[in-house]
Amino acid sequence: MSPKPYTHKDAVAYRPLDWTGVYPPAFPTAGVPEHIAIVMDGNGRWANRRGLNRIEGHKAGEEVLLDVVAGAIQAGVKHLSVYAFSTENWARSPEEVRFLMGYNRDVLHRRRDQLNEWGVRVRWAGRKPRLWGSVIKELQYAEELTRGNDTLTLTMCVNYGGRVELVDAMRAMAEDVKAGRLKPSAITEKQIRKNLYVPDMPDVDLFLRSSGEQRTSNFLLWQSAYAEMVFLDTLWPDFSRSELWRAIGIYLSRDRRFGGAINTPDASA
């Protein structure tokens, strides 16, 4: 199945970064998280509360994602990773799975030129098995189109699971050991990272989830080892760049310890 061609119904107006007329707070330049990971949750509940099909909730999230990308650029964030389709999502109804496959493909098709204009580099993290060929084609096209951009890297995690990513990395290293290309004693954290889907992806600084649920849902497990977790009650279709900035503000209020002691004279932990 190939991506459908553009028609007048698919036309998307180009948005300037500040199309909402809303601007971020004066964040300290050195403190803004370099990498934010987002679980875009709450589409189904948003639709149910309005008596709509779950699919309508997913549709409502397209403009939100574009707004959040713009807000991340405005705030000075360099990496944004979003959970677009998990390996567990195959367990949903056939109707919803079909929609999500086509939706991810078509959103990329509609928005890639806009993202390119903003200087966004699009990358893909995930597995090929079971993924529609047309989705893979759009992901790869967007990657190639935006390869030279460096304003923000947007990683679309499609057919992605954190545990499966680690299993795939272990299998790749096992093959290298079997072939004599790698000694078991040479397997380090650095070596494992080299075998992840996006080896040069920096660690997650801020792990953000919408909808009020407080779990990682198997997203970027390796990369989020020391991430600050922020869970906001807002459902994804009601999210905005302002909510993103609120999460960044919460992140900035915390003392990142990376396993060390609190930096105060009377610290007991």
Image: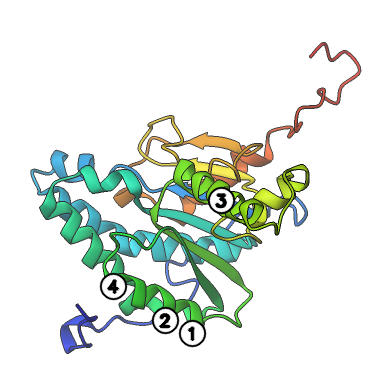
In front: mark 1 or mark 4? 4
**Disc 4, SS:** helix
Mark sitting earlier along the chain (3/4): 4
Amino acid marked by disc 4: Gly
According to the picture, the residue beneath numbered tag 1 turns out to be: 145
Residue 202 shows in the view: no
Q: Quadrant of the N terminus?
A: bottom left
**Disc 2, SS:** helix
Image coordinates for residue 237, horizontal then vertical, percent: 30, 51
Q: Is residue 177 left or right of residue 257?
A: left
**Residues at marks 3 and 1, CA–CA distance in whole angstroms:** 27 Å
**Residues at marks 2 and 1, CA–CA distance in whole angstroms:** 6 Å
Amino acid marked by disc 3: Ala
Q: Quadrant of the C terminus?
A: top right
Mark sitting earlier along the chain (2/3): 2
Mark sitting earlier along the chain (4/2): 4
According to the picture, the residue beneath numbered tag 3 turns out to be: 169
**Residues at marks 4 and 2, CA–CA distance in whole angstroms:** 12 Å
Q: Pick the residue in front: 156 or 76.
A: 156
Image coordinates for residue 196, horizontal then vertical, percent: 58, 55
**Residues at marks 1 and 4, CA–CA distance in whole angstroms:** 18 Å
Residue at (38% x, 50% y) in the render: 239
Mark sitting earlier along the chain (3/1): 1
**Residues at marks 2 and 3, CA–CA distance in whole angstroms:** 25 Å
